[in-house]
């Protein structure tokens, strides 16, 4: 993966720089330690690997097929509100509309099915004789065509020779002509004006005169065109409004949306449309009401009307279920179940995929409406049905979603195993050409696989999988299937949609495609940088701080994506959701950077970054989850603790959000709130160990309460930290202390965490080899010093240098001891002033010799 060059970050539209290459070979270690956020210097918790940010919800689009909107004919008049220059691009000279167009909407535009068909003026028309004046044509209104309230005037006559000559299929009102009226016989040189079609014959026509003043206008097509233009103009500015959050621009946006809705409403109320056109307009009208307004009742009412075109009927039912799920998820689930039964009866397999995916997404609603069993059941049904129909892509996405549910929602201890089994099913089809051609699907499979390895605490395997993902992302960086809105299509076999409507288009030999929505290319690459940093944070102190370099690249991409985002034509709600996700990812990246700085005692940089975190949280407002706020407060507490501000640290850890009553076993493993509460209380125990504290006696009591939470936690880092702190607190029994130290060292070695290993070795050397003259005491002190250097922790490097110097002094190696003390003093100068107090004096007295090492003030 290529890093930033010449100070330039990749553009926000699409990261067209190559993904960072594999890491250059560094010095190898047989036991690679893992720096993680436990107790002393917390790094980002492993739950981040299963955070929703790493698995953004993949949701199905409306099960519809896009159609390119037809361009508005140049002879149409400009709309009355054409002067709405909604903070955007100026009108192109010569354009009939003073508003920017956007890319074709993902929803089919109904007026594209009915092209404008205006007859041309006759080129052989004979002008009237001067001696016989042409009688004036009386003004008459069409009987069967109501005038749109948005169109009050028509332009001057123009030539229409470029349009077809057949009459428009949407105007068939000849039945309104009175039976007593006699149709005049037209002259061979001229034809009656199209305006008279379906109306009473004027006096001029009865007298054989000519009326060429105005062309015929199809108001149905005109209103559809106006609605498209107003909606396009609004959606083209949605991204900029979501970033700026300007009230005036937001008001102008909703004015354009309201005008477009009025055009469609006038069309539906005042005209009798063809059934297919009416269904399409109704569906889009309801969809805009659902996305842009709070008029859910109106949307439900118009969607309740039935029709006999099953594709549009299913589309309406799916949108109706989405609307109902906003207020009553349980009722929406029952409605979807009923539709699924009907679909199974008619064997409309493609729509069964769509509704079962919808059922799974509604089942993942927040408690108490959550139904994980129902979600997994529907995904397994999709997988088996897709396998029997030969839809490999659909079967793969069902397995991916099943793995995500196990990672994000499950509270079982074997959730990781279930997720690995599901992702193995998806990987078994990954080599199929149909799957390999979908870069979004390949990337999400690899990312979930890496997350499983991180949660299994297998750093070597996760690093290997990370290199494979980076190689794959490098190959797909110029793949044409990346879309600006993040959507991707799953091809369906011909047999799946054999009963589909004839109006559905064919793509690459497939009758239908199931569209899913995820992340655009720019956001996905930024997320991969973040995941790379999380995966390599365990070896950040050994490979040249590579985790921090990946994080800097990701932060640069997110800053570019927030300051100058790519304009995507979509609703303001969708744009706001996308910008909110980017800010959330940016906040998580900053938190990861804080913990990486803490892991190598860069407290000043950590505090500076934490201020930026708090600023970002203020921008996000109340939409931020408790888990992110809890992590930010935890980071503030450990920074206070590290720089010696003990009172501020204790006040932080005593906040209600860190109460042990909230650390219940019902919290999903993906939520880091429970583990953050446990870590905060473990640090509080270390602070209470100071005998000068008034509540010193609460240390043992708090640790006893923490015992069951730590021992039952699936987090191996927490179990190792708990054993280490128990060894330093319960010092009355030598056997118990040795047992706790052995468990801590064994757990830290298994997860390759050099920080906990360093503290455990330092405490063991001080407690059992202090004052002992011999080779064993020297080896113990040297082992602790080597592990501190491996952890790149300046604090513990200073402590272990002093400890080894004291041991060498007792063995008569004064010169070596003096050299080590000079190195220790030099490292100590770079630390906060509060950490220099009670420095060991080399005689066994001081902070190290009286309270079990530097744990009291430094942890």
Image: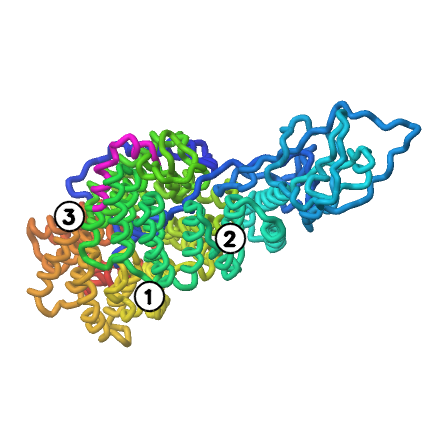
Please report the residue visible at 25 percent of the width from the left and 49 percent of the height from the top.
Answer: 381
Point out the stretch of residues depicted in magenta.
422-439
Q: Residue furthest top?
A: 124
Q: Which residue is mark 2?
A: 286
Q: Nearer the viewer, residue 503 or 741?
A: 503
Residue 376 lies, in percent from the top left, at: 26, 53
The earlier-in-sequence mark between 3 and 2 is 2
Q: Nearer the viewer, residue 251 or 434?
A: 434
Q: Nearer the viewer, mark 3 or mark 1?
A: 1
Please report the residue visible at 31 percent of the width from the left and 36 percent of the height from the top.
Answer: 495
Judge left or right: residue 590 versus residue 779. right
Give the overall secondary structure of the magenta segment.
helix
Tags 3 and 1 touching, CB below 8 Å = no
Tell me, yes or no, whether the highlighted magenta stretch contains residue 218.
no
Q: Give the CA separation, mark 1 to mark 2.
A: 29 Å
Residue 779 lies, in percent from the top left, at: 11, 48
Residue 528 lies, in percent from the top left, at: 34, 41
As drawn, 688 above or below 91 = below
Q: Give the CA separation, mark 3 to mark 1.
A: 55 Å
Q: Give the CA separation, mark 3 to mark 2.
A: 73 Å
Q: Which residue is mark 3?
A: 782
Image quarter hosting the C terminus: bottom left
Disc on res. 368: 1
Judge left or right: residue 90 versus residue 531. right
Q: Quadrant of residue 715?
A: bottom left
Q: Residue furthest front?
A: 180
The crowd level at tag 1 (other Cα within 10 Å; few <14, some 14-19, many 20+) is: few
Judge left or right: residue 379 versus residue 700. right
The earlier-in-sequence mark between 3 and 1 is 1
As drawn, 440 above or below 597 = above
């Amino acid at each position: 993966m290529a890093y930033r060059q010449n100070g330039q970050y990749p553009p926000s539209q699409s990261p067209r720089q190559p993904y960072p290459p594999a890491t250059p070979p560094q010095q190898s270690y047989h036991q690679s330690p893992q720096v993680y956020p436990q107790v002393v210097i917390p790094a980002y918790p492993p739950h981040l690997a299963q955070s929703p940010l790493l698995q953004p919800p993949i949701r199905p689009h409306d099960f519809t097929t896009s159609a390119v909107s037809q361009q508005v004919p140049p002879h149409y008049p400009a709309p009355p509100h054409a002067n709405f220059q909604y903070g955007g691009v100026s009108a192109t000279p010569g354009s009939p509309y003073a508003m920017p167009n956007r890319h074709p909407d993902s929803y089919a535009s109904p007026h594209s099915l009915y092209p404008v068909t205006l007859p041309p003026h006759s080129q052989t028309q004979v002008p009237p004789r001067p001696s016989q004046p042409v009688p004036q044509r009386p003004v008459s209104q069409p009987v069967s065509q109501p005038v749109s309230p948005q169109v009050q005037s028509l332009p001057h006559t123009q030539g229409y020779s470029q349009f077809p000559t057949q009459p428009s299929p949407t105007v068939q009102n000849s039945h309104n002509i009175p039976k007593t009226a006699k149709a005049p016989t037209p002259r061979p040189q001229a034809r009656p004006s199209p305006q008279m079609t379906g109306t009473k014959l004027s006096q001029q026509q009865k007298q054989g005169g000519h009326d060429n003043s105005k062309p015929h206008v199809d108001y149905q097509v005109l209103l559809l065109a106006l609605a498209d233009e107003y909606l396009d103009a609004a959606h083209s500015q949605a991204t900029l409004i979501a970033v700026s959050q300007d009230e005036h621009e937001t008001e102008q946006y909703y004015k354009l949306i309201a005008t477009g809705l009025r055009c469609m409403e006038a069309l539906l109320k005042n005209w009798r449309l063809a059934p297919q056109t009416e269904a399409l307009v109704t569906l889009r009208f309801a969809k805009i009401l659902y996305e842009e307004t709070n008029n859910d009742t109106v949307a439900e009412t118009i969607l309740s009307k039935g029709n006999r075109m099953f594709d549009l009927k299913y589309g309406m039912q799916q949108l109706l279920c989405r609307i109902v799920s906003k207020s009553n998820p349980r009722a929406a689930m029952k409605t979807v179940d009923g539709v699924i039964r009907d679909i199974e009866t008619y064997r409309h397999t493609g729509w069964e995929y769509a509704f079962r995916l919808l059922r799974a997404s509604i089942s993942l609603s927040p408690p108490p409406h959550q139904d994980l069993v129902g979600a997994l059941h529907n995904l397994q049904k999709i997988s088996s049905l897709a396998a029997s129909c030969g839809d490999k892509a659909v079967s793969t996405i069902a397995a991916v979603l099943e793995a995500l549910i196990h990672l994000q929602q499950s509270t079982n201890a074997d959730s990781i195993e279930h997720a690995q089994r599901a992702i193995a099913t998806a990987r078994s089809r990954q080599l199929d050409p149909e799957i390999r051609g979908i870069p979004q699907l390949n990337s999400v499979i690899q990312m979930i696989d890496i997350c499983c390895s991180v949660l299994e605490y297998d750093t070597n395997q996760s690093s290997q999988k990370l290199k494979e993902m980076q190689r794959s992302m490098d190959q797909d960086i110029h793949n044409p299937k990346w879309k600006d809105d993040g959507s991707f299509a799953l091809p369906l076999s011909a047999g799946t949609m054999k009963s589909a409507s004839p109006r559905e288009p064919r793509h690459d030999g497939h009758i239908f495609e199931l569209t899913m929505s995820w992340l655009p290319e720019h956001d996905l690459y930024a997320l991969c940088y973040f995941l790379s940093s999380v995966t390599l944070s365990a070896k950040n102190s050994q490979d040249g701080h590579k985790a921090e370099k990946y994080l800097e690249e990701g932060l640069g991409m997110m800053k570019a994506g927030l300051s100058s985002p790519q304009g995507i034509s979509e609703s303001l709600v969708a744009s706001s959701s996308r910008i909110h996700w980017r800010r959330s990812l940016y906040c998580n990246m900053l938190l990861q950077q804080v913990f990486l700085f803490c892991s190598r005692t860069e407290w000043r940089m950590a505090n500076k970054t934490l201020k930026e975190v708090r600023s970002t949280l203020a921008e996000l407002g109340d939409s931020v989850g408790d888990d992110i706020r809890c992590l930010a407060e935890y980071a503030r507490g450990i920074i206070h603790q590290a720089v010696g501000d003990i009172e501020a640290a204790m006040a932080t850890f005593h906040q209600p959000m860190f109460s042990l009553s909230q650390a219940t076993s019902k919290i999903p493993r993906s939520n880091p709130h429970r583990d953050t509460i446990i870590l905060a209380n473990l640090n509080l125990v270390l602070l209470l160990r100071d005998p000068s504290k008034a509540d010193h006696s609460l240390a043992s009591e708090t640790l006893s309460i923490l015992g069951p939470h730590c021992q039952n936690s699936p987090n191996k880092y927490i179990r190792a930290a708990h054993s280490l702190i128990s060894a330093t607190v319960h010092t009355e029994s030598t056997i118990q202390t040795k047992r706790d130290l052995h468990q801590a060292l064994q757990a830290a070695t298994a997860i390759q965490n050099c920080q906990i290993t360093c503290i455990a070795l330092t405490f063991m050397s001080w407690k059992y080899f202090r004052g002992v003259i011999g080779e064993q005491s020297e080896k113990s002190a040297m082992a602790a010093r080597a592990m501190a250097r491996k952890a790149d922790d300046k604090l513990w490097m200073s402590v272990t240098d002093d400890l080894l110097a004291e041991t060498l002094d007792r063995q008569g190696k004064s010169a070596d001891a003096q050299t080590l003390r000079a190195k220790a003093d030099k490292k100590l100068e770079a630390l906060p002033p509060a950490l220099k107090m009670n420095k060991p004096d080399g005689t066994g007295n001081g902070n190290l010799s009286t309270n079990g090492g530097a744990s009291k003030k430094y942890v």
